[in-house]
């Protein structure tokens, strides 16, 4: 099969726009706002250049005015979540319209509300979302015990869930933009009762840890893509919550759940999406360097970096065409 030149270019030399979203108010644990900094300190950008030959434009940090907008519901820090995501949606749209894959460095998972909302705007709604997570993040103000909005981004984005809010927050910049038909979960192992209700009522594509163990990760990925993007023509968004990975490798995160993905499996998911040539958005969220011992913090950060590199085609075998020829000094 001949690969179209445009695709080859994209796969060979990814164009990335990086944006920091040091946001922690979608939950209650301090430290997750340091995610972007620790990923950068681990030389993420240099490695993207070296291992993926990436052309990177650094868009810096999302700036927003903290807001104390009142809400009639129990949503924790609603004003801040709304203000930050509004800015992130704008930036994401800009980055994608600049022809770059948008890499959002969180922060807690509430930021996927903004990144995916912006992605939908940039691609006229023709988007499919791969949500890699231990949790389904599809609670509303009517189903959440805690009010933490990092457990709600899928519910905010999904058209089907619009009627299930006690008092659905109103946003002047966002309308639900995703159909649950185009959302696929990988790695779930902690699902709340009403989340299970939404999953079965709307037939959401779910491959939990049992599926992964029984089928193998590659066939899980193939099946997810077949279901959420049957015509292979959607712009893809990978929302990667580091808590999908087993806590022994990535335990520095707010809500770890035992029995998760191997690092190798996370890399396989990211790399498979890269190979589609249609990965236009990625979030890496919930890395919290305040949690766990120093060794675990390091492992968590390294794991997150490796998964991001895989999403942009990291090739550990090098780039022979870039090397000067190697000639033996003696024959024989
Ligand atoms: Mn999550």
Image (cartoon, grey):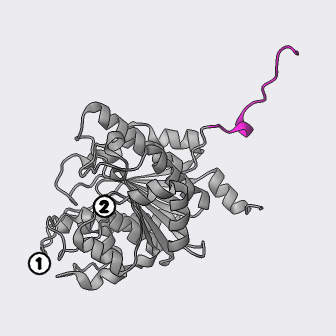
Q: Is residue 174 visible?
A: no
Task: Tell me which residue sits at (57%, 40%) in the image.
Answer: 51
Q: Is residue 318 magenta?
A: yes
Q: Which residues are magenta?
A: 317-332
Q: Residue at x 16, y 70 (%)?
A: 75
Numbered badge on residue 72: 1
Q: Position of residue 21 (x, y in %)?
A: 33, 55
Residue picked out by circle 2: 135
Is residue 258 or residue 143 the one in the foreground?
Answer: 258
Query: Quadrant for ligand 1?
Result: bottom left
The answer to whether the residue bearing label 2 lies less than 8 angstroms from the nearest atom of ligand 1 is yes
Judging from the image, what secondary structure is the residue with disc 2 in?
loop
Characterize the magenta stretch by its predominant secondary structure.
Answer: loop
Q: Quadrant of residue 183?
A: bottom left
Question: What percent of the width, then of the height, locates residue 323?
Answer: 72, 33
Quarter of the figure with residue 322? top right
């Amino acid at each position: 099969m001949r690969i179209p030149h445009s695709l080859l270019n994209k796969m060979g030399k990814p164009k990335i726009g990086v944006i920091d979203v040091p946001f922690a108010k979608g939950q209650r644990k301090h430290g997750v706002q340091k995610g972007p900094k620790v990923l950068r300190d681990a030389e993420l950008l240099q490695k993207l250049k070296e291992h993926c030959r990436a052309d990177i434009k650094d868009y810096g940090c999302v700036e927003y005015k903290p807001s104390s907008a009142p809400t009639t519901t129990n949503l924790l820090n609603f004003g801040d979540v709304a203000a930050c995501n509004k800015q992130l949606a704008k930036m994401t749209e800009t980055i994608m319209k600049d022809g770059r894959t948008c890499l959002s460095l969180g922060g807690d998972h509430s930021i996927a509300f903004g990144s995916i909302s912006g992605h939908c705007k940039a691609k006229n709604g023709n988007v499919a979302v791969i949500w890699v997570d231990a949790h389904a993040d599809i609670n509303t103000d009517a189903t959440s015990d805690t009010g933490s909005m990092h457990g709600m981004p899928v519910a905010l984005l999904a058209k089907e869930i619009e009627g299930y809010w006690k008092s659905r927050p109103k946003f002047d910049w966002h309308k639900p933009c995703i159909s649950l038909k185009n959302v696929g979960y990988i790695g779930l192992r902690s699902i709340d009762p009403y989340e299970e209700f939404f999953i079965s009522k709307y037939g959401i594509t779910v491959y939990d840890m049992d599926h992964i163990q029984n089928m193998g990760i590659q066939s899980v990925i193939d099946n997810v893509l077949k279901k959420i993007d049957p015509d292979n023509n959607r712009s893809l968004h990978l929302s990667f919550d580091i808590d999908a990975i087993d806590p022994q490798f990535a335990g520095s995160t707010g809500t770890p759940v035992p029995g998760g993905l191997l690092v190798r499996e996370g890399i396989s998911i990211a790399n498979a999406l890269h190979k589609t040539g249609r990965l236009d958005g990625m979030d890496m969220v919930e890395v919290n360097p305040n949690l766990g011992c120093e060794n675990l913090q390091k492992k968590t950060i390294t794991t997150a970096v490796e998964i991001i590199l895989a999403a942009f085609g990291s090739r550990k075998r090098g780039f022979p065409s870039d090397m000067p020829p190697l000639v033996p000094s003696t024959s024989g």
